[in-house]
Image: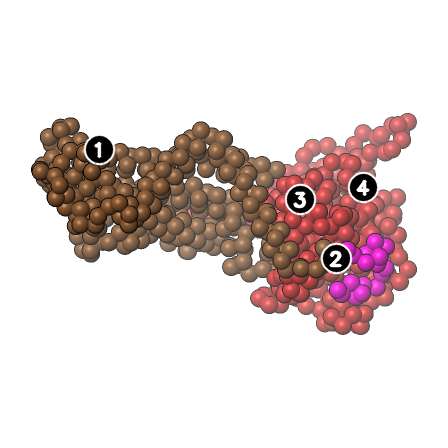
Chain colours: A red, B brown
């Protein structure tokens, strides 16, 4: 998806979200009465911005901390350190954006208002819906909690958004239970639930990874269309670069709790700077049967980052590692070329 | 609708105007749809319940006892003269000796005080239902709330309720009830409350808490937090309804233990109750008739068999409900 003319990200200076030095450590359980034996550095100093209506991809292997970043952003988790600030448009509409708010200060009623602006689409469309509540209950719940409309308005509103996400005729879906729907239909319901409050930002945590291949493209094009129509920004989490390419304006590549590279999608895919990004790209399937794929440039497994050594996180698997890399701390994420960020001493 | 806020264009099918859901009579239709859903899930549940022979058997027995309970006021109002047939104050003037063996006028004979045994049996059936169901409702209301709250908050709240439960489990409940009945005049209603409270804060709370813990970590709880809903809503709209099937199961088991506890306490003559199955056996015992073998069988057998059958029936109903509850849970989880 190319940057669109009149893109909100271009017109406003203040980004929608600004994440600065975000850290989340999880204690590793020690004995019951003893202190934790260490900390998983799930997210370890992550900074990025998302513009209005922009779609930022967060790509990386399993366990690198993508979901944790997403949950921190929507305030399902509280950060160990670092800050997240949001700058939503004024309720009045297209006016200048309001003052930035620090996510850490949001509690009670202000947290509830915040939930109108930032929503999450879960990876698992099966587990993320209460099995005892109908589709109507599920999608109308945000409206009910936020006290929008009465029960009858909500029926209309839910029917409307069901139509919008392609579940038609809406009346035949309203009073069904999640277990009566297919995986793809359920994920459409999840999208409807996330969008019914017209948020400014939606964090989508691998929304297609648990679906069968046939329903993936449908969900992806739906999300892309809706982003255009409703002017939502996405943090689109995926481990699949091909998906990120389709969905995202920019891509951030994560490795063991760190962002190692961040750039415009096509730039990043055409000229990857970081050795890890290059390794990831060599693993992307190519739709040409004649193409002989290079052997993957990296080998080995990612260990869970429990109290990692202070040097470059990628050192153990890096084909380009030097002695500088071994003795120096993890490289900072620097702007190597306009709009191109990478964390590597050898770039 | 505030869709207009957006700068971009909407999808074409939205601008074409969304279909209103069956225009007219909206609120009624909403209610109608909900009623249909409840009925449907009830029908499905009932089908599974009755599929198991155990469930059917339990249901037949329970219905039989319910008919017995209902027949008492009817009989008293029509063919039974209160002077003779009242379960507590009646006296069978027509019999030459008390207890009298079964006869046409007294199908189950009379007790040592000349009262009709069948009338006592039928009268008591109603009380047993009231006792069992009250105790079960109290238990389940308390245990479900305690379980959900403990699981949700954890920490000190959880520690408090769990230690309390351990304490109640450690105390043998029958002996505790014996002590309580010495201190207070325990009527049927208070007995039901005490049994309900003991069960609710005791073992049942622990079982429901561990179930609630497994519900709490499921993604739909995070999804509920994402709507901005408060803790109260998460506990009572999202956790509790998913606990209810298991609660229902434990309700059945509580009925059994309440009826059983009543029988034991009444047999020991500790309760402030006019008539019950336990008291019938108690009366036979104090007259020394319990020791005289099968000669006075009608004093013991009807009440004893009733206790056994009704207790078993509720227990079996619980087992059959287990079949309804568990496969359903896993099916709904996908
Ligand atoms: N609640 C938690 N407690 C302890 N450790 C956690 C917790 N949540 C995540 N972690 C750890 O943090 C690391 C990052 O997890 P995260 O779920 O963010 O990864 P991910 O990139 O989303 O992976 P995946 O692609 O498998 O979803 C993992 O090592 C994980 O084990
Ligand atoms: S800093 Fe060194 S070890 Fe780290 S990615 Fe770059 S070359 Fe590899
Ligand atoms: Mg994840």
Residue B207, labelled with which disc?
none
Q: Is residue B3 magenta?
A: yes
For label 1, count other residues whose C-alpha is less than 10 Å away and answer few (under 14), some (14-19) or many (20+).
Answer: some
Q: Are marks 2 and 4 on the same chain?
A: no
Residue pointed to by mark 4:
A217
Residue B301, labelled with which disc?
1
Find numbered disc 4 in the image and state the secondary structure of the residue it sits on.
Answer: helix
Residue A125, labelled with which disc?
3
Say whether residue B84 is visible. Answer: yes
Q: Which residues are magenta?
A: B1-19
Q: Chain of mark 2?
A: B
Residue pointed to by mark 2:
B20
**Viewer-closest of A39 and B331:** B331
Residues at circles 4 and 3 in contact by the CB criterion of under 8 Å: no
Direction from residue A335 to residue B281 in the image, left or right: left
Find numbered disc 3 in the image and state the secondary structure of the residue it sits on.
Answer: loop
Residue B316, percent across and down? 39, 34
For label 3, count other residues whose C-alpha is less than 10 Å away and answer few (under 14), some (14-19) or many (20+).
Answer: many
Task: Quote the CA–CA distance across marks 4 and 3.
Answer: 16 Å
For label 2, count other residues whose C-alpha is less than 10 Å away and answer few (under 14), some (14-19) or many (20+).
Answer: some
């Amino acid at each position: 998806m190319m940057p669109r003319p009149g893109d909100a990200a271009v017109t406003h200076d203040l980004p929608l979200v600004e994440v600065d030095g975000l850290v989340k450590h999880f204690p590793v359980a020690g004995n019951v009465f003893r202190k934790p034996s260490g900390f998983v550095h799930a997210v370890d100093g992550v900074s990025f911005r998302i513009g209005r209506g922009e779609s930022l991809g967060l790509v990386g292997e399993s366990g690198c901390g993508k979901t944790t970043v997403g949950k921190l952003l929507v305030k399902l988790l509280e950060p160990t350190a670092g800050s997240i600030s949001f700058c939503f448009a004024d309720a009045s509409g297209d006016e200048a954006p309001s003052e930035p708010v620090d996510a850490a200060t949001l509690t009670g009623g202000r947290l509830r208002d915040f939930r109108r602006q930032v929503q999450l689409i879960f990876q698992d469309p099966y587990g993320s819906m209460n099995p005892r509540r109908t589709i109507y209950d599920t999608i109308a719940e945000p409206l009910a909690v936020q006290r929008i409309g009465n029960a009858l308005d909500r029926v209309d509103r839910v029917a409307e958004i069901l139509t919008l996400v392609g579940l038609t005729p809406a009346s035949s879906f309203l009073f069904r239970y999640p277990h009566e729907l297919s995986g793809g239909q359920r994920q459409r319901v999840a999208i409807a639930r996330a969008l019914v409050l017209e948020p400014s930002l939606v964090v989508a945590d691998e929304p297609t990874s648990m679906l069968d291949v046939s329903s993936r493209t449908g969900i992806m094009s739906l999300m892309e269309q809706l982003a255009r129509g409703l002017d939502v920004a996405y943090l689109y989490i995926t481990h699949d670069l091909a998906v990120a390419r389709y969905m995202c304006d920019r891509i951030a590549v994560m490795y063991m709790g760190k962002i190692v590279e961040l750039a415009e999608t096509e730039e990043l895919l055409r000229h990857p700077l970081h050795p890890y990004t290059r390794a990831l790209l060599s693993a992307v399937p190519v739709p040409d049967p004649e193409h002989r794929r290079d052997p993957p440039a990296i080998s080995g497994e990612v260990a869970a980052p429990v109290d990692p050594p202070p040097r470059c996180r990628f050192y153990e698997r890096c084909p380009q590692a030097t002695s500088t890399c071994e003795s120096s701390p993890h490289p900072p994420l620097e702007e190597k070329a306009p709009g191109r960020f990478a964390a590597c001493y050898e770039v | 609708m505030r869709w207009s806020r957006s700068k971009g264009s909407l999808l074409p099918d939205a601008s074409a105007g969304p279909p209103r859901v069956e225009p007219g009579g909206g609120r009624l239709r909403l209610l109608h749809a909900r009623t249909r859903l409840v009925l449907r899930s009830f029908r499905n549940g009932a089908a599974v319940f009755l599929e198991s022979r155990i469930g059917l058997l339990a249901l037949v027995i329970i219905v039989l006892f319910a008919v017995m309970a209902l027949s008492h006021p009817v009989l008293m109002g029509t063919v039974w003269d209160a002077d003779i047939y009242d379960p507590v104050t009646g006296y069978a003037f027509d019999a030459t000796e008390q207890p009298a063996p079964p006869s046409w006028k007294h199908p189950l004979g009379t007790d040592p005080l000349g009262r009709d045994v069948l009338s006592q049996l039928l009268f008591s059936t109603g009380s047993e239902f009231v006792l069992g169901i009250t105790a079960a409702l109290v238990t389940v209301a308390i245990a479900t709330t305690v379980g959900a709250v403990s699981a949700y908050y954890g920490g000190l709240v959880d520690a408090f309720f769990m230690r309390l439960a351990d304490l109640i489990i450690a105390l043998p409940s029958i002996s505790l009830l014996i002590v309580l009945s010495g201190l207070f005049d325990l009527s049927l209603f208070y007995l039901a409350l005490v049994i309900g409270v003991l069960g609710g804060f005791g073992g049942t709370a622990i079982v429901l808490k561990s179930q609630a813990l497994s519900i709490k970590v499921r993604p739909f709880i995070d999804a509920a937090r994402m709507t901005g809903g408060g803790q109260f809503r998460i506990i009572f709209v999202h956790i509790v309804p998913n606990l209810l099937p298991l609660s229902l199961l434990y309700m059945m088991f509580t009925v059994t233990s309440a009826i059983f506890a009543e029988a034991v306490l009444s047999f020991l003559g500790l309760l402030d109750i006019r008539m019950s199955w336990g008291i019938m056996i108690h009366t036979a015992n104090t007259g020394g008739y319990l020791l005289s073998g099968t000669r006075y069988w009608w004093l013991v057998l009807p009440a004893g068999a009733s206790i056994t059958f009704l207790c078993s029936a509720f227990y079996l109903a619980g087992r059959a409900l287990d079949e309804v509850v568990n496969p359903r849970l896993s099916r709904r989880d996908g």
